[in-house]
Image: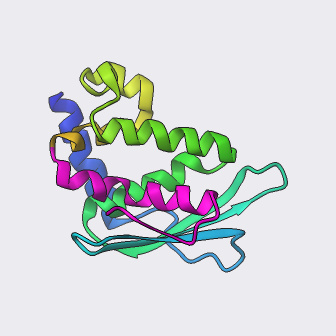
Amino acid sequence: MAALDQLYQDVILEHNRAPRNFRAMPDASAHADGINPLCGDEVTVWLRLDADERIADVSFQGQGCAISKASASIMTQAVKGKTRAEALALFERFHLLVTGRAGAAAEDEAAARAAFGKLAVFAGVSAYPTRVKCASLGWHTLKAALEGAGEVSTE
């Protein structure tokens, strides 16, 4: 897992320095605000769904640690173009990954990359329970936006 650990560090640093889709979206069809009260991380996620319920555009803004910002950045790339159902299913899979319940895929580097693609870099977060909420904040906020909830807390 050493290569995956190094990739994790590189990806987190890159997405924290230059987050993708980091902007407000005035024409959003849905949005939600998320907060992690334990550490103060905050994120807002905006979505624009097309007529087929596909995520035509997604963006976020917020403040927080590098893991929180990087995870939200990668999330926006991962869900763009997916249907609401596909995005919610990906949320579930990602949550299992970061909580260490994704089975062998989280333990074996090749299996993790095959099962989760770029998201596999977050497999190691499960070893640090306090960081799970950081990595999943943007995802919980995405889920809240997709389900029509205005806000969510990781507490």
Given residues 17 and 134, the one toward you in this image is: 134
Answer whether residue 142 is magenta in the image.
Answer: yes
- For the residue pair 106 and 149, the one nearer the viewer reads as 149
Residue at (55%, 70%) from the top-left corner?
32
Please name the predominant secondary structure of the magenta segment in the image: helix
Query: Percent x, y for residue 82?
Result: 66, 44
Inspect the magenta stretch and tell me whether residue 139 lies in it. Answer: yes
- The residue sitting at the right extreme is 51
Quarter of the image containing the C terminus? bottom left
Q: Nearer the viewer, residue 40 or 150?
A: 150
The color scheme shown is: rainbow
The N terminus: image quadrant: top left
Picture mark count: 0
Q: In the displayed structure, does residue 66 sit left or right of residue 70?
A: left
Give the image location of residue 142, x and y in percent. Answer: 53, 58
Left or right, 44 with reference to 101: right
Residue 6, above or below 41: above
Q: Is residue 58 above or below residue 100?
A: below
Range of magenta residues: 128-155
Quick check: 51 above or below 4?
Answer: below
Residue 129 in view (yes/no): yes
Q: In the rendering, at what x and y percent does residue 107 appear?
A: 24, 24
Q: Residue at x 32, y 22 (%)?
A: 103
Q: Tell me if 14 is positioned left or right of 34 in this view.
A: left
Task: Report if residue 82 is visible in the image.
Answer: no
Q: Residue at x 60, y 70 (%)?
A: 31
Q: Position of residue 46 (x, y in %)?
A: 59, 68
Side (left or right) of 102 relative to 2 = right
